[in-house]
Image (cartoon, rainbow, N blue to C red):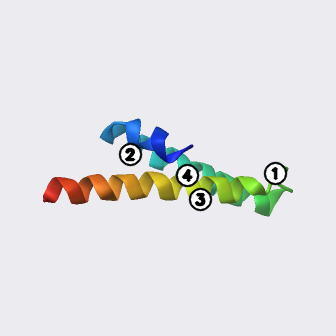
Amino acid sequence: MKAAEVKKLRDDEIKAEAARLRKRLFELRAQSVTEKTKDSSQFRKNRKDLARVLTERSARMKKATK
């Protein structure tokens, strides 16, 4: 997910996307413990996507308080 895509999302969609990415990271961690992961690059991609979403959410909250 690109930063431009994240900026187009509404606030409620950002919340849902953050929850989805957190759940996916949890599933990847569980999968790595129980079985071999097929694509280990998914960890990094999901973490970066989550960071983008949380950064945008933080920026919007900061902008709203000003």
Front label number (3 vs 2) = 3
SS label for mark 2: helix
Q: Quadrant of residue 33?
A: bottom right
In the displayed structure, does residue 30 sit left or right of residue 66? right
- Disc 1 vs disc 3: Cβ atoms closer than 8 Å? no
Specify the amino acid type for callout 1: Asp
**What residue is disc 4 on?**
49
Q: What amino acid type should be assigned to the residue bearing mark 2?
A: Lys
Q: Where is mark 1, residue-wise? A: 39
Residue at position x 69%, y 60% from top?
29
For marks 4 and 3, give the CA distance: 5 Å
Where's residue 35, x and y in %? 84, 56
Say whether marks 4 and 3 touch (CB < 8 Å). yes
Distance CA(mark 2)–CA(mark 1): 26 Å
Q: Residue at the spot x=46%, y=42% of the render?
A: 4
- Residue kind at label 3, given as amino acid type: Arg
The residue lying toward the viewer, choosing from 22 and 48, is: 48
Q: Are marks 2 and 1 in contact (CB under 8 Å)?
A: no
Number of numbered markers? 4
Report x, y in % for residue 64.
17, 53
- Judging depth in this view, the residue of 29 and 5 nearest the camera is 5
Q: Count neighbours of disc 2 (C-alpha within 10 A) and say few if under 14, some if 14 to 19, many if 20 or more.
A: some
Query: Quarter-wise, where is residue 30 in the image?
Result: bottom right
Mark 1: few, some, or many residues within 10 Å (few <14, many ≥20)?
A: few
Q: Point out the frontmost of discs 4 and 1.
A: 4
Q: Which residue is mark 3?
A: 47
Q: Which residue matches tag 2?
A: 15
First in sequence: mark 4 vs mark 1: 1
Q: Earlier in the sequence, mark 3 or mark 2?
A: 2
Residue 45 location, x and y as percent? 65, 53
SS under mark 3: helix
